[in-house]
Amino acid sequence: MDSDSWALSVDQQEATTKTSEVLWIRERRVIPKTDAKETAKPPDGDKSDEEEKEDRAAQSLLNKLIRNRIVNNTNQVEVLQRDPNSPLYSVKTFEELRLKPQLLQGVYGMGFNRPSKIQETALPMMLAEPPQNLIAQSQSGTGKTAAFVLAMLSHVHPANKWTQCLCISPTYELALQIGKVVEQMGKFYPEVKLAYAIRGNRIEGAIQEQIVIGTPGTMSDWLTKKKLIDPKKIRVFVLDEADVLIGIQGHQDQCIRIQRKLPKDCQMLLFSATFEDTVWQFAERLVPDPNIIRLKREEETLDTIKQYYVLSRNTNDKFNALCNIYGAITIAQAMIFCHTRKTAAKLSKMMAEEGHQVALLSGELTVEQRADIIQRFRDGKEKVLITTNVCARGIDVEQVSVVINFDLPLDKDSNPDNETYLHRIGRTGRFGKRGLAINMVDSEQSMAVLRAIEEHFNKKIVKLDTEDPDEIEKIAH
Ligand SMILES: Nc1ncnc2c1ncn2[C@@H]1O[C@H](COP(=O)(O)OP(=O)(O)OP(=O)(O)O)[C@@H](O)[C@H]1O
């Protein structure tokens, strides 16, 4: 009997005992969608990461907190112009935009040497006279916020002591992040003032600040009920993170209510990192006659990744395999993905006991705590980052050369999640350094998931015997 079928027969036996996680996965498959939340809990009451509420606003904030530079992209920008006959300008330098000197100084002060890919095309459109409406989509970190902040700062008349630009953000925390960019970019333009339309910010009398950033509810309140802002005097209306925004109850209607009060010639700008149909429908309702700019995400590939799998019988066995791998090769930094918080916590404890410097990224931490942990890991202060999927989604830790799938990624219906697999271990062309991915297989089901992933990408995942140090050593070369 070869070891594959041996392990499978062990698993088949285990699958019949009530306590295994495997059983739980099987149960989930037959749960009707309506009460899945109630019944899909694993026997020990642990939450799978898929069940943790996916909070896109928190993820977006996390990304902003840990990002310290532009995400480069070598794809072509796709442009759909409202008037296809008008010439399409794109700029390679900030000078070409004829910005006010104070703003150019602000841009350079932030360390920007040249416009990012999306800024090259978006900025001339946003700064054109007469103003043009724009819907722009590109992945987070490609320079959208910096672009619309520059547009707002360019369009205000500082001598006018009333609000001229409104910027809507899905949450309080995200609004503050935009405000920081306004402050940095407007550092040499102190006449322009900024206010936040966010809950708890009580203002008496008309707003004099030229730029107001806020969440849809409070913003709508200030415009309609409290009449602190005159909507007829608004020249630029920005909607940031439309994809996050529409996921929050009531936000869409509030945005539409605000937009209807604005003058016809007010410039409307909408930004999104992704573009599902729902975002598109929302964008079309809000932005009349738009120019559209899209920058496709840079594709990740598995081409430079060596992929292995390890057969184990259970969690302890997987842990031993991991120890053997650590004992045989030097791993500078690794990310380890688990399916549940509980496994992640247990693994983290076990590895710490073995003397590893471990960081645990877990769902119950605040966004700030998570950002702090990721930052420490990026700085090399910890060598192992253990996480569940929801926590790690959207995080790029480029220097990690080893990724371990302690549990293989499953979607919410417990099917193989190819996209997440690719995102965990894949590399974009630019960071095409060689990487190593090790997948832990502990059941017939997880073997089937592995095979499905292998087939999907048409890339062989090679078996690794973790009992044999010489074999492990070979994978490092
Ligand atoms: N032209 C530029 N040159 C260098 N850095 C830039 C440039 N534009 C923006 N950045 C920096 O790149 C990072 C990402 O920019 P920005 O926040 O504007 O992107 P984004 O697309 O709005 O992403 P998100 O929506 O997640 O904030 C920031 O640290 C920002 O300061």
Image (cartoon, helix red, strand yellow):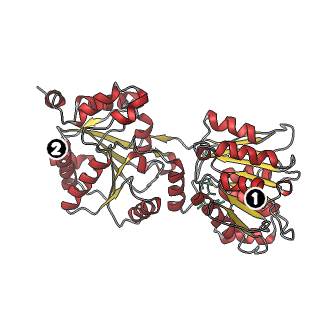
Picture coordinates of residue 306, whole percent (x, y)? 34, 42
Residue 385 location, quadrant: bottom left
Residue 342 position, x and y percent, is: 28, 49
Q: Give the residue drawn at x 80%, y 62%.
A: 163
Position of residue 190 measured from the top left corner of the image (x, y, whole percent): 75, 75
Is label 2 in a helix, a strand or a loop? helix
Q: Amino acid at mark 1?
A: Lys
Badge 1 is on which residue? 226
Q: Which residue is mark 2?
A: 317
> Do residues under tags 2 and 1 come within 8 Å of each other at their CB atoms?
no
Of residue 305 and residue 162, the one placed in the foreground of this image is: 162
In the rendered image, is residue 302 in sight?
no
- Split into quadrants, the picture shows ligand 1 in the one at bottom right
The tally of labels here is 2
Quarter of the image holding residue 100? bottom right
The answer to whether 456 appears left or right of 201 in the picture is left
Give the number of the mark in front: 2 or 1: 1
Q: Is residue 368 left or right of residue 226?
A: left
Looking at the image, the residue that sits furthest to the front is 225
Q: Quadrant of the N terminus?
A: top left
| Relative to 353, residue 304 above or below | above
Task: Estimate the spatial distance between the alpha carbons at disc 2 and disc 1, rounded to whole Å.
Answer: 63 Å
Asked if 242 appears above or below 348 in the picture, the reply is: above
Instruction: Say which amino acid is labelled 2.
Output: Asp
Q: Give percent across and percent down for residue 96.
A: 80, 60
The furthest residue to the left: 1
